[in-house]
Amino acid sequence: MAQQVQRAIAFDLEGVLFPEIWPHLAEVYGISSLRATTRDVPNYEDLMNSRIDALRANKISFSSILSEIAKLDPLSGAKTLLNELRTSLPVLILSDTFEQFAQIISPKLDHPTILCHRLIIENDEIVGFKLRLQDQKRATVEAFQRLNYNVVAIGDSFNDLAMLHAANTGLLMNPPENIKTTQPIFPSFDSLEDLSLHLKTILV
């Protein structure tokens, strides 16, 4: 008798299930350099160092940032989709956000598993960050595959591509045109509703 395939699903967070945090902060504080995301800058560490420099130059406190993140809500349909999927298979959120931000976001999504990095805070100021693991999204997908899971991965940005290529099935959710054009092997969806319908056809 053939063994049924065991599946797991891995989501990126910002831009897929939750609004992009840094462009929101750019608007709130009027700092144009904060608008850049991993949709624009492939090197995540360079991007974060630039963000930290901008926050320091503008004297933006860590507590102020947390209060702004608390004002954001998940994208429409995100919580429902996660809860539906979690009834039948392991669901992971693999994100380049930070534990301190995730503590605010997690309750808004009914406490999913979120694996991410950690900020270094001194005197209410972001002074650095510690990566949980180099290339953590790809490494986590491959770890689940070694546990004999068939992994579906969903992302939208440059920092998701290694994860999508490593996964058994990679999907793009509302990606920028440059990623959509250069990564035609991945089906692309413009809404969580369309993504949800597609997942129902492949997660059987």
Image (spheres, rainbow, N blue to C red):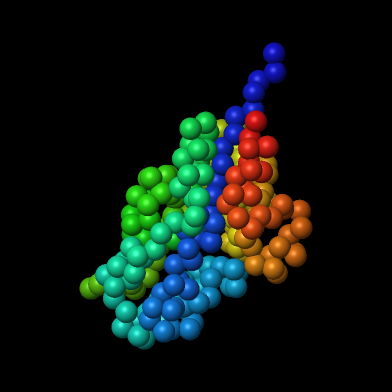
Residue under the image location 63 percent in, 37 percent down? 200
Counting from the top left corner in percent of width and height, residue 124 is at 25, 72
| Quadrant hosting residue 182 | bottom right
Counting from the top left corner in percent of width and height, residue 168 is at 67, 42
| Quadrant hosting residue 60 | bottom left
Residue under the image location 56 percent in, 37 percent down? 8
Q: Is the C terminus in the top left, top right, bottom left or bottom right quadrant? A: top right
* Left or right relative to 17: residue 146: right
* Left or right relative to 174: residue 186: right
Please name whichever residue, 167 or 65, is drawn nearer the observer in this view of the structure. Answer: 65
In the displayed structure, 117 sits above or below 92; it is below
In the displayed structure, 178 sits above or below 50; it is above
Counting from the top left corner in percent of width and height, residue 64 is at 29, 73
Outermost top residue: 1
Q: Is the N terminus in the top left, top right, bottom left or bottom right quadrant? A: top right
Please name whichever residue, 36 or 133, is drawn nearer the observer in this view of the structure. Answer: 36
Please name whichever residue, 191 or 3, is drawn nearer the observer in this view of the structure. Answer: 191
Please name whichever residue, 130 or 200, is drawn nearer the observer in this view of the structure. Answer: 200
Work out whether residue 180 can be spotted.
yes
Outermost left residue: 123
